[in-house]
Image (cartoon, rainbow, N blue to C red):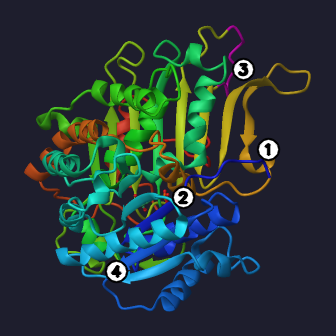
Amino acid sequence: MQHHKRPPSSLLFIFGGSGDLNYRKLSPALFNLFIDQWMPEKFGIVGIGRTSYSSEKYCARLLEGIQQFSRRKGEQNGKWQDFSKHMTYLEMNAENEEEYQKIAEIVKTKEQEFGEHPNVIFYMAVAPQLVPDIVKKLGPLNICADTKCTRIVVEKPFGHDLTSAHELNLLLRNMFDEEQIYRIDHYLGKETVQNLLALRFANALFEPIWNRNYIEHVQITSAETVGVEGRGSYYESSGALRDMVQNHILQLICMIAMEAPVSFDANEIRNKKVDVLNAIRKIKTEEAHEYAVRGQYSEGFMKGEKVPGYRQEKNVAPQSKIDTFAAVKFYIDNWRWQDIPFYVRTGKHLHEKTTIITVQFRPAPSYAFPPEASETWRPNRLTISIQPEMDIRLRFQAKRPGQFMILNPVDMIFNYKEAYEGDEPEAYETLLLDIMEGNATLFMRSDQVEAAWKIIMPILEAWTIRPPVDFPNYAPDSWGPEDAEALIARDGHNWITLTSTH
Ligand code: BG6
């Protein structure tokens, strides 16, 4: 393994220690960092929750989570024993201000044990409505004033709309400096997403043609086969537009559309991204129907298995108007992208699990070849598969071997699994390591979050003013409502997936 420097000593408090995020994502990620020798020499992880657990029981439960959800299953030849020595559980009622002293005491004890003051990281892995109250009670602790070592990590959803996101930002900024706040968008931690910067800015090939002169349109599909998976009560206050577009998908647009950064400094990269968000055309509420389509799944079959409709899911209102599918056409009003549509769509219970970005180039300027040679001619296209496939395909024309001049499109493929050995780190591994190292590049700054809300607010407003009349309007295992096909077909295009043939 390549020699690397480990992050400084760190003490991590996970609010929501007995919850799902810690079980499925955080603990597996921290354990993988430990196996790969990325955890600090000295560290402690304290799970905080209301459930009563002994530290042993707590660890045993997290090991179950690892067996189920980690990219490396099981306890890895005794490594779990070593790792779990660093873990404790703190039963605490986070509503009770006095109990926060327990945290201060743990920090003191660990300081003595480590022989130095560690990074102190507060991870909010709790329901979003609990965050403000915890922040208020945490803020007055002396350690929070340590702008260098103390950090707070906030999961999405960051606010429910522009106003609540702004209020949450104000509250956080009252207690912490911006540099201490790590707002998570886990898509930014994905290897394939980080590679977008390398693809665009470490190659001479793409950047000169990466603009409105050569690109006809861009598409992003982020489709899931799962339904709401028991998260009905969260999803009822969210919907696909809030859950996926406001954050993950707009961030993907930023990576595709941003100008070249002049350095890898966290603020420089985030400045370039926020420029994109600020340039995205604000749709007028009364015109939203021309740009945005919503859907909700009915009952039906997923790969032959019967599944309930969204309205029949647990904790969902029988007449719910929440979108489980959203498609939007965006424009970015700047020199590079003026009038180039960016089509995005996302949804639950769709036909495939896939996140794919397609950059569709304009057709070659002249078809010098005779019509019979170029019947299957297609414009160049770059498809970037983010997940579960991880590859990049460049489609171009080739002459079919033989005595006839017949052209057809072929793919040049870069496949991660073939090119590189071993598993790539999970997004949460990368993000947790960055937090310990104090690198905020892959995290959302307050202005980015608010700029993203500004973009989707008119759509949300339009959808509230005009409740949907056709819900449920798509069957499970489909590609969403027909209107989503019409949204892109009106402009003469169609949605592309890896399995589509156009
Ligand atoms: C989360 C959403 O942010 O992203 C979920 O809340 C969604 O609804 C998930 O399922 C998708 O993440 P991934 O990494 O599986 O694409």
Q: CA distance from mark 2 to mark 4?
A: 23 Å
Amino acid under disc 4: Gly
Residue 165 rendering spot, x and y as whole percentages: 20, 49
Nearer the N terminus, badge 4 or badge 1? 4
**Element class at badge 4:** strand
Residue 163 rendering spot, x and y as whole percentages: 13, 47
Residue 491 rendering spot, x and y as whole percentages: 38, 29
Camera-nearest label, 2 or 1: 2
Left-right relation of 450 to 106:
left
178 and 250: which is toward the camera: 178
To which residue does mark 1 refer?
419
Q: Residue 372: which disc?
A: 3
116 and 173: which is toward the camera: 116
Write the residue at 37% across / 56% down: 153
Q: CA distance from mark 2 to mark 1?
A: 34 Å
Does the Cβ of the disc 1 residue fall within 8 Å of ligand 1? no
User: Which quadrant of the view contains residue 423?
Assistant: bottom right
Nearer the N terminus, badge 2 or badge 4? 2
Q: Vertical placement of 262 versus 441: above or below?
A: above
To which residue does mark 4 refer?
49
Does the Cβ of the disc 2 residue fall within 8 Å of ligand 1? no
373 and 501: which is toward the camera: 501
Amino acid under disc 2: Ser
Q: CA distance from mark 3 to mark 4?
A: 69 Å
Question: What's drawn in magenta, residue-wise?
Answer: 368-377
Write the residue at 73% across / 44% down: 415
Write the residue at 69% across / 21% down: 374
225 in magenta: no
Q: Residues within 10 Å of mark 1 (few under 14, many from 20)?
A: few
Q: Residues within 10 Å of mark 2 (few under 14, many from 20)?
A: many
Camera-nearest label, 4 or 1: 4
**Element class at badge 1:** helix
